[in-house]
Amino acid sequence: MAARSDGTSLTTPAPEAETHKRAHSRGAAAVEAGIVSLLVFTLFFGIIEFGMLWRNTHIIGDAAREGAIEASQGTREDTYAQLAMDVMDTRLDSLPRGEAFHVTIFKADPSTGRPANGQDLLTCTDDCYRYDYNDTTDTWELEALAAWPAATHQTCDYIGVYILGKYDWLTAFFGDDRVLEHTAIKRLEPAPGEATCPTIAPPTVQPTPTPPPTPT
């Protein structure tokens, strides 16, 4: 047994204790490395996932706006809905197959963004065209149950385009698939010789009367 200069004994640690200490340190380091790796991988895949989600959301939004513009400019043609659908198909083609699966072109109420006749966007049977994506043929198919003929269009009508899609998460970290949808509305462009739609002045807001002072 060794002794210090002050005469007290100096105990040398047993080899077993040193081995146990080193093993404990290695185990703690492995646990810490696992936790840090999990956080890093979650952050890495989160950046990828939400970047792809942002991209798909903007593609669907751009397609709806471009389709509404095309439809509003060509509404005196009987094929206006198909022309708008062709424009949207070109834009949506950059999405993974099947991640946009429904389109409705409809007579819109600009105050609500919904069909002017109060019907549902997915099941409307009047004043609209509904298209569903066929994954087998990679084409958009028109449902023949509804229509808004060009002959019934009025200069001051509004036309809307609704696109429904989804985003399939690459990993299971963030739950089920994310539903994506976007609606764009444009006023019909007047045909040659037609009068333009009058501008509707906003309602006049009456000032709130000031209550009389409370007598003291």
Image (spheres, rainbow, N blue to C red):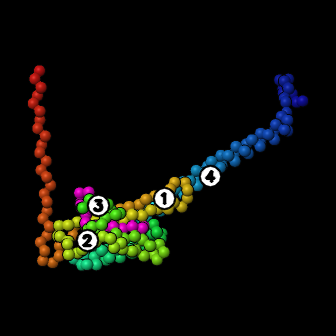
Which residue carries the number 2 mark? 148
Return the residue at label 4.
Answer: 37
Where does the magenta region start and end?
100-116
Which image quarter is the N terminus in?
top right
Residue 119's disc number: 3
- Give the CA separation, mark 2 to mark 3: 13 Å
Q: Quadrant of the C terminus?
A: top left
Q: 27 or 100, which lies in front?
A: 100
Label 3 environment density (alpha carbons within 10 Å; few <14, some 14–19, many ≥20): some
Spatial distance from mark 1 to mark 2, Cα to Cα?
Answer: 33 Å
Q: Tag 1: Cα neighbours inside 10 Å, few (<14), some, or many (≥20)? A: few
- Comparing marks 3 and 4, which lies closer to the viewer? 3
Q: Is residue 152 above or below residue 47?
A: below
Which mark is in front, 3 or 1? 3
Marks 2 and 4: in contact by CB < 8 Å?
no
- Could you tell me how far apart the alpha carbons at marks 1 and 4 are, in whole angstroms? 25 Å
Distance Cα–Cα, label 3 vs label 1:
27 Å
